Image (cartoon, rainbow, N blue to C red):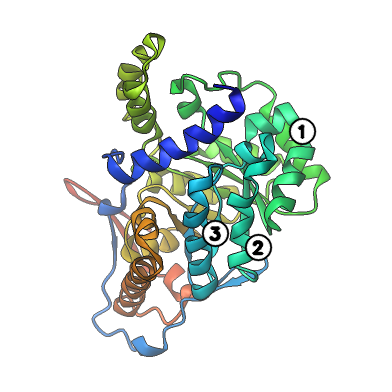
Amino acid sequence: MTIIHQTSSRKLDHIRICSQDEVEQGDPGFRGVRLVHNALPECDMARINTGVRFLGHQFGSPLFIAAMTGGHPETAVINQRLAQAAEQFNLGMGVGSQRAALENPDLEGTFAVVRDAAPSAFICANIGIVQLRDHGIEWADRAVEMIGADALAVHLNFLQEAIQPEGDHNAQGCLASLSSLCEEVSYPVIVKETGSGIAGETARQIAGAGATAIDIGGWGGTSWAAVEAIRADESSRDQDRHLVSLGEEFLSWGIPTVTSLAEVVPAGLPVIATGGVRTGIDMAKAVALGADLAGMALPLLNPALKGEAPLNQAIERLLHQLKVTMFLTGSQDIAALKRTRVIISGTDGALGVH
């Protein structure tokens, strides 16, 4: 199998494994966060405004459809349904890594379908930082042009790369490449982790490089160590067998989402909280802790596989949970939610108040 075909096949493996296997690991930290209940909320739930502004665009709510897929012919319908939902609910959306289509233009349609289905939604293109380093700004521009994107996400996934049989194991020169990109392009650049979280010092490096926003991608949701361990276990190549135990040994590696959020917010960039966000209550907690948007992928995957109606129902449920949470904290809008008092608790009781 050629490298190009490997990339496309890997995308289908990821969707199949994430939809069928147990790939979530750890606790993102939301269970230890409590929003203070307002017994006298003095607001009308029917008039609560969940709208939020991010990178100059107005969104219907903080829910962000996080990067999922593309790059194999069978993934086009998933991206189409997700994009239709983004358009209907006025949500932002990211596509999966576009490497497969950048290597093989025949696959561009699996990504371009997103803009066709969501002509006015905020769409975020996606390339890996290693591909940025190796191929330069040309690939970044092509990724954005491919889907008429409003922004570019540059993803960091070195835990996954370390465990993949075909992974990239050299991270040298990536920060310089990011700085060059941010200096040269006019579109927003969002730097995103994919499940291991971002520390405060890394966030400051990213801000110093000129990035526009950060997607923390914290630990506690989908584990790419788990996904790659499953792929290695399914492999017929003997040289891949050791990667099964390697993936299992790194299941607990990373910074929990809530901890990463606390580390990254002081860097001063807009923040998307992803990693184990599973309910509208989690979304509200993330916003109260300083996030601008809260992203989800896995909770929307199986509904998207089933069809347009199940996906819309899943999103409606999440948005209703968010609105009820805002009502119970007396938050008439997102600005008020950001001012909501937060109690950080642990097994021994309250540890602090935000």
- Circle 1 Cα neighbour tier, 10 Å, few/some/many (<14 / 14–19 / ≥20): some
Q: CA distance from mark 1 to mark 2?
A: 24 Å
Q: Is residue 186 above or below residue 337?
A: above
Residue depicted at 48% across the width and 40% down the height: 194
Between disc 1 and disc 2, the foreground one is 1
* Mark 2 closeness class: few <14, some 14–19, many ≥20 residues within 10 Å: few
Give the distance between the C-alpha atoms of the residues marked 2 and 3, in whole angstroms. Answer: 13 Å
Give the residue drawn at x 65%, y 20%. Answer: 172
Give the residue pinned by disc 3. Answer: 93
State which tag comes first along the sequence, 1 or 2. Answer: 2
Q: Quadrant of the C terminus?
A: bottom left
Question: What number is the disc on residue 32?
Answer: none
Q: Which residue is mark 2?
A: 55
Residue 305 picture quarter: bottom left
Q: Indicate which label's residue lies in the foreground, 2 or 3.
A: 3
**Residue with the mark numbered 1:** 136
User: Which residue is at 48% across, 63% downward?
Assistant: 81
Q: Judging from the image, what secondary structure is the residue with disc 1 in?
A: loop
Badge 3 amino acid: Met
**Foreground pick, 72 / 17:** 72
Residue that extends furthest to the top in the rendered view of this protein: 239
User: Looking at numbered disc 1 in the image, what kind of residue is underneath it?
Assistant: Gly
Figure check: 175 above or below 113: above
User: Which badge, 2 or 3, comes first in the chain's sequence?
Assistant: 2
